[in-house]
Amino acid sequence: MKYSELETPRLILRGWRESDLEDLFAYCGDAEVGPAAGWPPHTDKSVSQSVLHHFMEAGDVWAVVERQSRRAIGSIGLHEEKRRENPNCRMLGYALSREWWGRGMMTEAAQAVLRYAFETLCLEMVTVYHYPQNGRSHRVIEKCGFHYEGTLRRGTVRFDGQVLDNICYSLLRTEYEAARLETARR
Ligand SMILES: CC(C)(COP(=O)(O)OP(=O)(O)OC[C@H]1O[C@@H](n2cnc3c(N)ncnc32)[C@H](O)[C@@H]1OP(=O)(O)O)[C@@H](O)C(=O)NCCC(=O)NCCS
């Protein structure tokens, strides 16, 4: 894992391990999860196995581990930003087991990752994108303080052939720092 382990009140964000295979397969097989993020549901454990190995090799995706159960319930990553020619920028991506939706878990994880991105990695900017119908992800993005940039119309041909717009957001380090100061002042 090229990033450090992070902790939040309810979660541990750590590198993926071979022993996470069952947990990964459990939520990645859900037809409501992958397609919302742009990837097909895992139909077989061997698909999860290769994704797990990819996560372990790339080292840019944390396992989102729920503290009490010690289960991996999702993933969150800071990926290479292929849409911009700026090495000091990364793209945020995430997915969570449906069992855990609506409890503020991903917002908690994303806020910890943003803090790490700006305060430890000293990135200049973090971007994030969602498809038009993804109201849940839209709320996570909003709660994290991202700024709407615009819509990349017909930005993606998804694995199932659907042509989808990309709703684009970013957060600059200066904006992140200003928001932190504002929160501290209140
Ligand atoms: C997007 C996702 C990570 C959100 O995780 P989560 O832990 O449920 O997110 P949070 O609980 O922090 O926030 C979800 C927000 O969406 C709101 N919400 C729930 N259902 C909604 C809906 N149908 N439309 C709009 N907002 C909705 C919740 O009320 C909450 O907002 P609130 O805090 O103002 O009440 C999760 O739904 C997921 O994994 N989805 C599938 C994969 C995916 O979409 N990944 C992102 C790709 S861009």
Image: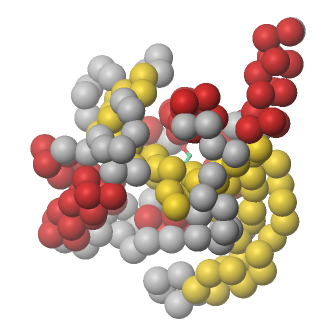
Compared across the picture, whether 108 is left or right of 42 comes to right
Q: Position of residue 182 (x, y in %)?
A: 86, 19
Count of numbered circles in the view:
0
Depth check: give the residue in front, 64 or 181: 181
Whether 147 is drawn above or below 106: the answer is below
Whether 80 is drawn above or below 146: the answer is below
Q: Position of residue 65 (x, y in %)?
A: 33, 33
The residue at the point 14 percent across, 48 percent down is 18
Depth check: give the residue in front, 14 or 96: 14
Q: How is the image coloured?
A: secondary structure
Compared across the picture, whether 109 is left or right of 55 comes to right
The residue at the point 21 percent across, 60 percent down is 53
Q: Position of residue 87 (x, y in %)?
A: 60, 58
Whether 132 is drawn above or below 56: the answer is below
Whether 152 is drawn above or below 175: the answer is below
**Can see residue 134?**
no
**Can see residue 135?**
yes
Compared across the picture, whether 9 is left or right of 132 comes to left
The residue at the point 77 percent across, 28 percent down is 177
Depth check: give the residue in front, 37 or 121: 121
The residue at the point 72 percent across, 76 percent down is 165
Depth check: give the residue in front, 96 or 126: 126
Quadrant of the rendering where the C terminus is positioned:
top right
Quadrant of the rendering where the N terminus is positioned:
top left
Compared across the picture, whether 182 is left or right of 143 comes to right
Q: Position of residue 169 (x, y in %)?
A: 75, 56
